[in-house]
Amino acid sequence: MALKIVALPGDGVGPEVVREGIKVLKAVEESFGLQFDIVPYPCGGKHYLETGEEWPDAAFESCRTSDAILLGAIGYPGANLPDGDLAGAGVVFGLRFGLDLYANVRPTKLYPNVRHKIHDVPKQVWEPEKVDFVIVRENTEGAYTPIRGSLRRGGLEELAVDNSVTTRKGAERVIRYAFELSSRRTGAPADGMKRVTCVDKSNVLQGCRLFRSVYDDVAEEYPGVERDYAYVDAFMQWMIRKPETYDVVVTSNLFGDIATDLAAVLQGGMGLAAGGNIGDSHAMFEPIHGSAPKYEGQDVANPMATVLAGQMMLEWLGETKKERTLREASHAVEAAVEAVLKEGKPLTYDLGGKAKSSQVGDALAEKVRILAKSEE
Ligand code: IPM
Ligand code: MG
């Protein structure tokens, strides 16, 4: 059975990293006897400048009928909608809201031989075994709820309002996702405890108070998972100081947006950070680095984040379709990334190497083939 994967390469380096991601998926197809029907659509800010639309009309419907979606990046200099919004963001939000992708899942794992990006930290404290947690960000409400507006634009009396909405249903499903995820994992690196940390600002915000009380209700159902609470401001420093104490972290939309970029620092930077936007019946996977327009067309962007997004996609497909081969393929892709990192070559500039994106993609595809053979 062929799986339909919609590819949305988008802007800047998006098309280059998605090309390498697909290269690795092709190696997976050959090596694991799987079949992917990859359906690409143009989209993003540049596409908007050229055509007046952020993506073709047919693209959303195609995503809705796909098995999974792989997105590159959105955002092009000077590409804005008439109201000032980033052109192309409608693709990301169209998918998140339109397909109800309520859990934004961000694994934060430092692989061996990778240096994290905290300024001037000496080599002996890289300790990869200390960083292995997942941030689960609520993805359909909070401060991203599209109930906003402004009055008297441009004048001295100008006013702008954003509303942050928290619903019991929205909080419950993402918190449940976090507890289910923790139940399947091996616990926090520091003590092996399964733990879900609720990150909020419930000392001030009403929506966060609801979020925390729903967290308490859901936690009752998971006696094997430890409860943990942190205010978001304090969490930001604990995440950097003691990453090993975290297993799964659940938080609201805007806090999660901020925390996940900071978390990428602990795993060697944006070139290695992948994310999944996951709902009950659809999912979209992406590297979280964005379009990086100044590197566009140079074949230098690290494709590993996209390849790891593909790995998350295979894992999710394996779970939802109850298909062991997909799960094995997902392990092989992660092992391929680990193997290249361990060998220390080829690496792109962000990891201290000089290799092209396409060379890293070739090496990863080759590793997948070798790993698949050795498992036969
Ligand atoms: C992310 C991004 C998006 C967000 C932007 C591109 C709209 O920063 O996925 O984290 O704010 O959610
Ligand atoms: Mg973000």
Image (cartoon, rainbow, N blue to C red):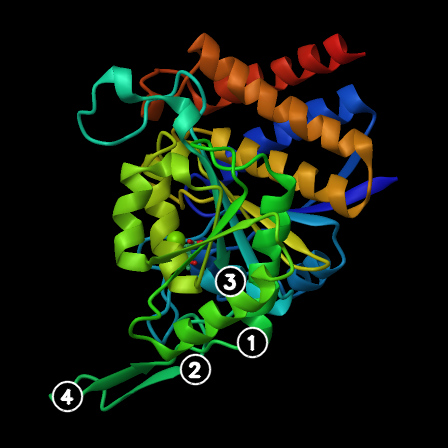
Q: Is mark 4 within 8 Å of ligand 1?
A: no
Q: Which residue is mark 4?
A: 155
- In the image, is residue 371 above or below residue 298? above
Of circles 3 and 2, which is in front? Answer: 3
Residue 54, visible in the rendered structure: no
Q: Which residue is mark 2?
A: 147
Q: Is mark 3 within 8 Å of ligand 1?
A: yes
Q: Earlier in the sequence, mark 2 or mark 4?
A: 2
Q: Which residue is mark 3?
A: 139
Q: Nearer the viewer, residue 105 or 355?
A: 105
Of circles 4 and 3, which is in front? Answer: 3
Q: Earlier in the sequence, mark 2 or mark 1?
A: 2
Q: CA distance from mark 3 to mark 2?
A: 15 Å
Identify which amino acid the numbered label 2 is placed on. Ile
C-beta proximity under 8 Å, tags 3 and 1: no
Find numbered disc 3 in the image and state the secondary structure of the residue it sits on.
loop
Identify which amino acid the numbered label 3 is placed on. Asn
Q: What label sits on residue 168 in the rendered view?
A: 1
Q: CA distance from mark 4 to mark 3?
A: 33 Å
Find numbered disc 1 in the image and state the secondary structure of the residue it sits on.
helix
In screen coordinates, is 18 left or right of 180? left
Where on the picture, by quarter, is residue 27?
top right
Residue 274, visible in the rendered structure: yes
Q: Nearer the viewer, residue 221 or 275?
A: 221
**Residue 212 pos. (x, y %):** 45, 68
Identify which amino acid the numbered label 4 is placed on. Gly
Q: Earlier in the sequence, mark 4 or mark 3?
A: 3
Q: Earlier in the sequence, mark 3 or mark 2?
A: 3
